[in-house]
Image (tube, rainbow, N blue to C red):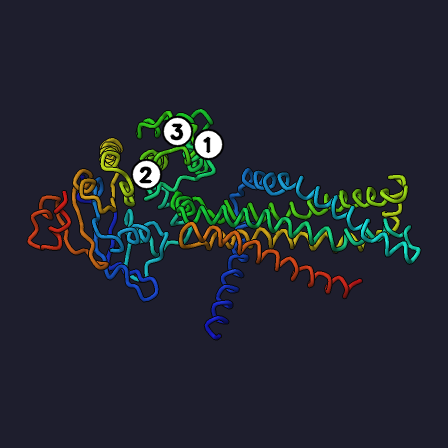
Amino acid sequence: MSEQPIISIKNLHKSFGKNKVLRGINLTVNKGEDLVILGRSGSGKSVTIECLVGLLEADKGKIEVFGIDVTKLNYKELNKIRLRIGFMFQNGALYDSMSVRENLAFTLKHHTKHLSEDEVEKQINEALENVGLKEAIDKMPTELSGGMIKRIGLARTLIIKPEIILYDEPTAGLDTITAKEISELILSVQNKYKTTALIITHDITCAKMTGNRIMILKDGLIHAEGTFNELKNSIDDWVRSFFEYE
Amino acid sequence: MIAFIKKQLTQAGKFSRFIGRFFRELFVPPFQFNEFIRQCYTIGYKSLPLVGITGFIMGLVLTIQSRPTMTKFGAESWLPGMVSLSLIREIAPVITALICAGKIASGIGAELGSMKVTSQLNAMEVSAINPYKYLVVTRVLASTLMVPLLVILADLVGIYGGYIGYNVHSSIGLLRYFSEVIENLDFLDIIPATIKTFFFGFFIGVIGCYKGFNASGGTASVGRAANSAVVTASLSIFVVDMLAVQITDLFY
C-alpha cells in the first residue's frame, strides 16, 4: 500500500430536500488500501459512494478520483473514470433478463469490441473461477441464492479489471456463514488483484476482515477513524457501541 | 391547487426533457443495433398474433354490424368500400395503437421500472454504459417503426375479415371484393392515416420508457409505472388522433 491518494473527498455535502445526509465529509483512500466506512442505516454511507461514481450529484465539495475532480466532468469524461472503478451493489443488481454468462459478457463486449468470442468466454470463465462459481455460468439470476448473486456481482465487477472497487453493503441480507465467505472472497480478490477498495458496511465482522482502516460515519460526518482495534478500544462510548456484538 | 398545477408543469417539463434527450442520443454513436433488432422482434413480431386476430375481428364485426343499416338504404354494395375506409382511416390505427399501448407500453414500463428499483439501471451507468441509449433509444425507435407495420397488418387482415363478414349473408368473390375496396380508396386515405401511426408508436414507446425510468419506491412502483404507462399512452393516442384528424382536415 502506498501513500499516494487515489480517492480524495473534501467537504462533501448532499441533501435530499430538507434532509441533509452528508454535512461535509472528508476522506482519503490511498492506493492499495482497503478502507471500510461503518455507520448505521441512513448515515449516508451509500450516498457517499454514489456521489463518488456520479450516480448522485454532490451539492457541494470536491471528489477527486485518480487526481481528477469527478464533480466537474461531463458524461463522457465521467464514463472514462467509471471504467476504472468497479461497483458491487448491495443486491447484486444483476441484469435479470440475462444469464450469468450474458451478465458478464455484456459490459466486457460493450467496452472491448476487438475481443474475439473465445477471448470473451475465457475472461468470463476466469472471473467466475475467481469467485468460485464456474458452474453457474448458464444460470439465470432468479436461479441463484443471495450469496451466489453477490459473488456473480463481484465477478461482473472484476471482469473490467478495475483499479478501485466500491462495495456497497457486500454482506447485507446474508446469513453469518455466507457473509463470512463473502468477506473472505473480498479479501482474496483484494490480495490477488491489488485493487484499492472502499467497503461500505454495518457488518463488524466484514469490517474487521476486510479493512486496513475504518471510518465511522455519524449524522453525515466522519465521527471516528482508525484501525479496528483502535476503534474497538475507543474512549468514545458511541464508537465502542459498534463493537459490542463482535 | 397551485401545488397541483406546479407538479403537472414540472412533470411536463421532465417529460419534454426526456423526449429531447431521445433525439440528442439518437444521432450520437455508438448505435445499439443488436438491441434495436431485438426490440423490433419483441415489439413487432411478438405482437403479430394479437394484432392479426383483433384486426380480423374488427373487419368482420364492422361488416356484420353495418350490413342492416346499409341494406335499409339499399347500399349493401357499398359495404366493402365503407368498411375498408373506416378501417384504414380510423379504426385499425386507433384500436391497434390502443392494443399496443396495453401490450408494449405496459411491458416497457414494467421492465424498466423493475430495472430501476433493483439498481440495474445504476449498474449499467457505473459500468459506463449509457442506459438511456441502450434501453430507451432502442425501444422508442423500435416502437415508432413497428406500430405502423402492425397497423398495416391490421388493415389488411381487417379487410379480409370484412370479406368473410360480407359472405355470411351474401356471396362475393375475393378478387371482386378487393377490387371494390381498392376502387374506393385514395392515397389520401392511406398516407395521413399511416403517418399518424408513427406518432402513436413514438408516444407508446416514449411514455413506457419515461414511466419505467421514473419508477421509484420499491416493487409497488413497478406496477404503478406499468399501469400509468398504459393509461397515459392510451390517452396520448386519442390526443394525437384528434390533432392528426384536424391537421388532415385542414389540408384535404
Say which amino acid is labelled 1: His
Few, some or many C-alpha atoms within 10 Å of disc 1 (few <14, some 14-19, many ≥20)?
Answer: few
Say which amino acid is labelled 3: Ile
Q: Which residue is mark 2?
A: A162
Q: Identify the chain of the residue marked 3, using the numbered disc in the image.
A: A
Upstream in the sequence, badge 2 or badge 1? Answer: 1
Task: From this view, report whether residue B44 is shown above or below residue A155.
Answer: below
Q: Which mark is residue A124?
A: 3
Q: Give the quarter of the image for residue A179.
A: top left
Few, some or many C-alpha atoms within 10 Å of disc 2 (few <14, some 14-19, many ≥20)?
Answer: some
Nearest to the observer: residue B59 or residue A22: B59
Say which residue appears at 67% left-offset and 39% top-offset.
B49
Q: Secondary structure at mark 1?
A: loop
Cα distance between the residues tagged 2 and 1: 19 Å
Upstream in the sequence, badge 3 or badge 1? Answer: 1
Say which amino acid is labelled 2: Pro
Q: Secondary structure at mark 3?
A: helix
